[in-house]
Amino acid sequence: MASHSFFWLVEKGIMNQELLRIVENIARDKNIDKESIFADLEEAMVSAVRKHFGDAESEIIVQIDRSGGGVVAFKDGQPIDIKRLGRIPAQTAKQVMIQKIRADERDSIFSEFVQRKGQLVSGSVVRYEGGALIVNLDHWTEGIMPKGEQIMGQTHRPGERVRCLILDVKESASQVKIILSRTHPDFIRRLFESEVPEIAEGIIEVRALAREAGYRSKVAVMSFDDKVDPVGACVGVRGSRIKNIVDELGGEKIDIVRWNDSSQILVANALMPAKVSEIALCFELGRATVVVEEDQLSLAIGKHGQNVRLAARLTGWDIDILTPDEYNQGIERLAGCVKGVEGSDDVLVDKLIALGIISVLDLDDVGPDPLVAELKLDRGLAERLVERADREAKALTAEADQKQTQKQLAQQTKVSETTPREDAE
């Protein structure tokens, strides 16, 4: 309403306190600096004067009194009565002002939301548009949540309040595009900050987070106060805090684990609820070999490998899960391989295991350089060990392929035997 009145004043040439009031309203409604509006208005009136006189060379100056609303205009130093310019120049000023106010509005929206990038925001669902969700963030700004940033399986009704993360803010010639997300890991981080006061106050810190949106997330937390249990604080009394977050995510499972600077302890914590028997870390490969009992194997791996996959992303380690039998078989094969090389002994096998190398595959992947640098081996011996490990690894791979082929043939034979044959015509 204020903008329509404003353009009416431009056309009528009325410049007074009413103009100041309307400028104030536009600045407030569109979140634009008043000085920018005054500057734009002066430029628009300069364009109108040039339009009236058809003169592109003369020096045109227009000044608006910021306190009284009065307007003075000069052409080559001579005063002009701007009220007598007529309707066509006023229409020119109007069009220029529309363009400039839109540009100022875009700049205002961009500067505001680019500072809020990565923050949590609440909005009202407007509609779905080509799979993307349009969310009204305030009375003049809309954000867009692409399909890939929406939690799978969740739908939202128009008018529904929804919380999301400001993922990105992009500026183009015609609009500001605010990208929203509910699948980004930082969305959960911000939810924890809003639901757990100790995190907002800096007593508890979310050290790492891994997420498969809509299914499961793992959050590693630590406390800077020995008296505050980070896991308990995040869960809340009778699970009240974590319940609010889970409800917001539509039932997504969240595992809260205790952070530890020791990689071995952290990996064990990250694989919970599975109980870990032993962990061997190979820093050269960034690999953690985890041993669990048979009854813990399915828990450690998780449905479709989800638990171990999230644990790997949370800790930054490539995690292999083995049973005790598989682990022992790998050690035995490694020992046999190493002892078959002249100049090797049981002590060297122990050193390799301490280095996190627990199979011939590991030894083949590591290569000779770490053996020379870490174990101080003669390079010739290191190269012979890796060469022998390479042969053993190829043989092991061939055995695995052969077993897989036999398994597939057995399954096909079983299917053909149980399928009834059609009677011959």
Image (cartoon, helix red, strand yellow):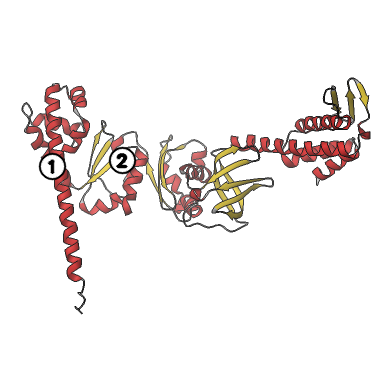
- Of residues 388 and 423, the one nearer the viewer is 423
* Drawn side of residue 112 relative to residue 249, left or right: right
Disc on res. 202: none
Q: How far apart are marks 1 and 2 (CA)?
A: 31 Å
Which x, y percent locates residue 344? 8, 28
* Drawn side of residue 344 relative to residue 404, left or right: left
Give the residue at mark 1: 395
Q: What residue type is labelled 1?
A: Ala
Residue at 19% x, 61% y: name it. 411
Q: Element under label 1?
A: helix
- Of residues 63 and 225, the one nearer the viewer is 63
Which x, y percent locates residue 179? 56, 43
Which x, y percent locates residue 278? 22, 42
- Of residues 188 and 202, the one nearer the viewer is 188
Q: Quadrant of the C terminus?
A: bottom left
Give the residue at mark 2: 267
Q: Element under label 2?
A: helix
